[in-house]
Image: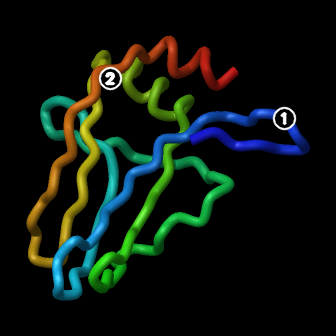
Amino acid sequence: MLTFTNGRVGPPYFVISAVNEGSRDVTVTSLGLSLPGGATLARFETTPFLDTALPARLADGGIAEVHFSYLGVGEALKSAGVTQIMPFAMDSTGRRYNGKPVDLNPDELIEMSA
């Protein structure tokens, strides 16, 4: 996702979304990115987006979202010495839902943020 400020292209962001496709309400307790080996990528930055406050109760079709900057992800991957992230969501029953792993070049993410 790109951002725009005063008509100029701003820094890019990843959007991690959880959508309730069922017919019963579900409570999302966490959304994020995991690294190989199971570590979770911590996010200490503020973004220009309104992230969903968690835990969040989602009705049928409801969506929860969090945002991660390319720069933050690139720096974290480089620091950890890895090149893969996997989005995930966890619900109030403790069930974890994983997205597809994505291979990335940390240096390219950092460069795209400049």
Task: Please name the residue that numbered disc 2 is placed on.
Answer: 80
Left or right for 13, reference 37: right
Please tell me which residue lies in front, 114 or 6.
6
Residue 96 occupies quadrant: bottom left
Left or right for 94, reference 106: left
Instruction: Indicate the position of residue 33 as horizontal and vertical percent values.
Output: 31, 44
Residue 41 occupies quadrant: top left
Tag 2: residue type?
Ala
The residue at 25%/73% (across/down) is 20
Left or right for 77, reference 3: left
Task: Please name the residue that numbered disc 1 is placed on.
Answer: 8
The residue at 9%/66% (across/down) is 95
> Are there few (<14), some (14-19), or many (20+) residues within 10 Å of tag 1?
few
Tag 1: residue type?
Arg
Q: Secondary structure at mark 1?
A: strand
> Are there few (<14), some (14-19), or many (20+) residues within 10 Å of tag 2?
few
Instruction: Indicate the position of residue 102 as horizontal and vertical percent values.
Output: 28, 28
Q: Is residue 41 above or below residue 107?
A: below
